[in-house]
Amino acid sequence: MDREELIFQEYKTYCEQKENFIDRNFNTNKFYMAAIFVIIIAMIYTGNVVFINLITATLVFALLGVSISALWWMNVDSYNTLIKIKYANVIEKIEEKFPVKPFTDEYQGIDEYRGKKVFMFSDIQKLIAAISALFFFAICVSEISPLVMAGVNKFLDLAVKVRGGI
């Protein structure tokens, strides 16, 4: 096997690995979407369950939802970074040795398209993660508000008792 054939085989293998990596990214997104769906269903069915000190199952699931959404956002970001590195730093450098550079041309096309401020798939993924985080955060606030008010009322009652006793 000559040097050019060896480089081509490495290129081919690396491209296949990149595609497998992208497939893992899609599977990871499916997991996060399913997890958020399951959390919403769990919140619906356990809405009246109260734990210690008025902490509800809804609050616990909402906090979990915020966490899952944040992890999803970070995961999308890291996958995008790694895919860009695979394109720019590895595949494009190998393609410099070839007469045709399909991935380099594709990446340049994507960059030009991105310059038009069009949403890409990763932007949509991040948008869904952000919307779900805001949804769960709003539920957290609505669940925590009564707890905070109960704490403030206890503090005020205690302050009135201490003040009245002096």
Image: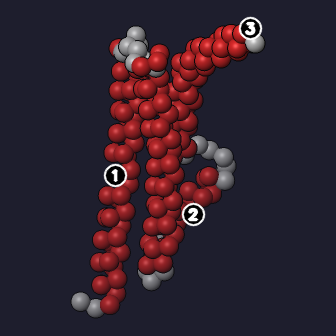
Q: Are marks 3 and 2 in contact (CB under 8 Å)?
A: no
Q: Position of residue 58 (x, y in %)?
A: 44, 20
Q: Is the residue 2 above or below the residue 164 in the image? A: below
Callout 2: SS: helix
Image quadrant assignment for residue 32: top left
Mark yes or no: residue 106 visible: no
Residues at marks 2 and 1, CA–CA distance in whole angstroms: 24 Å
Residue kind at label 2, given as amino acid type: Gln
Q: Residues within 10 Å of mark 3 (few under 14, many from 20)?
A: few
Left or right of 150: which side holds 53? left
Please tell me which of labels 3 and 1 falls first in the chain.
1
**Residue shown at the point (46%, 49%) measured from the top left:** 75
Q: Quadrant of residue 161?
A: top right
Residue matched to label 3: 164
Q: Nearer the viewer, residue 62 or 97?
A: 62
Residue drawn 30% across the image and 71% down it: 13
Mark 3–mark 2 Cα distance, whole angstroms, equals: 75 Å
Q: Secondary structure at mark 1?
A: helix
Q: Nearer the viewer, mark 3 or mark 1?
A: 3
- Are discs 2 and 1 less than 8 Å apart at CB? no
- Under mark 1, the amino acid is Arg
Q: On the rendered structure, is 120 left or right of 29?
A: right
Q: Is residue 118 above or below residue 9?
A: above
What number is the disc on residue 159?
none
